[in-house]
Image (spheres, rainbow, N blue to C red):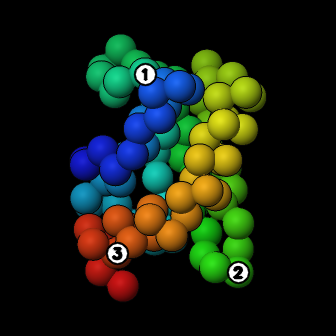
Amino acid sequence: MPKIFSDQNSNLYFYIYTNDHQPAHVHVYKGKKNEANIMKAKINIGTSEKRPHLVQGNTNMTNKDIIAALKIVAKNQEIFLEKWQEIHGR
């Protein structure tokens, strides 16, 4: 599960699982991922026609963190899609 992006200001880390499924999405963790870290969200990356959107959020992750994560994915959507395609193909 490669980490594809991190934002130090918000302490959010973005991962793509290597054995994951469509549609293209990222797993977002507040803080570095470890077994004790359960603050996470799953965000579909979207496409050039569709904005990223939350698929699943953990109740321990604040709305502020989820909104920040959605903004980061939207801002870096093209890069995240390229990373997905590198890992999973087209």
Tell which residue pokes out farthest to the bottom in this image. 90
Task: Identify the residue position indicated by label 3 in the image.
Answer: 85
Identify which amino acid the numbered label 1 is placed on: Gly
Identify which amino acid the numbered label 2 is placed on: Glu
Q: Secondary structure at mark 1?
A: loop
Image point (66%, 37%), residue name:
68
The mark nearer the N terminus, 3 or 2, is 2
Q: Secondary structure at mark 2?
A: loop
> Distance from label 3 to label 2 (Cα)?
17 Å
Q: How many marks?
A: 3
The mark nearer the N terminus, 1 or 2, is 1
Left or right placement of residue 20 versus residue 2 in this view: right
Position of 50 relative to 53 (above/below): below
Task: Identify the residue position indicated by label 2 in the image.
Answer: 49
Tell which residue pokes out farthest to the front in this image. 9
Task: Identify the residue position indicated by label 1 in the image.
Answer: 31
